[in-house]
Image: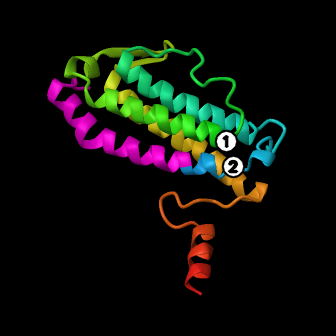
Amino acid sequence: MKEMTAENATFLLHGVYLPAVKNESQLTKKVIEAVPADKAEYRPDSVSKSAMELVRHIAAADIRFLDTVITGQFATGAVLPPELKAPAEIAAWYSENYAQRLEALSKLTSEQLLKVVDFRGMFQRPAVMFLMIGVHHTIHHRGQLSSYLRCMGAKVPSIYGESYDAEQARKAAQA
């Protein structure tokens, strides 16, 4: 594989990744906010994570991947404050912390973006690549969580297009 240049890293960050991660974070926040607090322990199977476990995992991992790019190292310590108990509290924390990290990301130098980061001994990539690794991770778990919503009696928000629930709300508003 060809080595990434400073120009490549800067283009990826500003031209591709920052707009994508900003959009994905807004979609993720909508899905987290859609989880009903009184049904957050729902799980479709005994081996599945509960909705709240997914909410916590998604929020923490998203911030962790941004921190990886900013600090140049993948850390596995706690990110999400344990006192946050409700999906709405976690969504607010997520939104605030994501915005702070987006600001920090926009100021990184090409040297910081190119720093090679080890991911648990499994692979090493330039720090900037962890933005898309994080997005793919979040999309996977956000899909899991969004599939729980209707089973919990919640409305599924629009993600990459109008959801059934958003369509029904739009039609009711037009009637």
* Residue 98 on image: x %, y %: 45, 34
Question: What secondary structure is marked by label 1?
Answer: helix
Task: Give 39 or 21, whichever is nearer the viewer.
Answer: 39
Labels 2 and 1: the sequence-earlier one: 2
In the image, residue 38 above or below residue 160: above
Q: How many marks?
A: 2
Q: Residue at x 35, y 29 (%)?
A: 129
Q: Would residue 166 appear left or right of 124 to someone viewing this image?
A: right
- Which region shows up in magenta? 1-29
Q: Nearer the viewer, residue 29 or 138?
A: 29
Q: Is residue 74 left or right of residue 92?
A: left
Q: Are marks 2 and 1 in contact (CB under 8 Å)?
A: yes
Q: Residues within 10 Å of mark 1 (few under 14, many from 20)?
A: many
* Residue depicted at x 39% and y 29%: 101
Majority secondary structure of the magenta segment? helix
Where residue 87 is drawn, which disc sits there?
Answer: 1
Check disc 1 and give the amino acid type. Pro
Amino acid under disc 2: Val
Residue 33 placement (x, y as % from top left): 62, 48
* 89 magenta-colored: no
* Residue to which mark 2 is pinned: 35
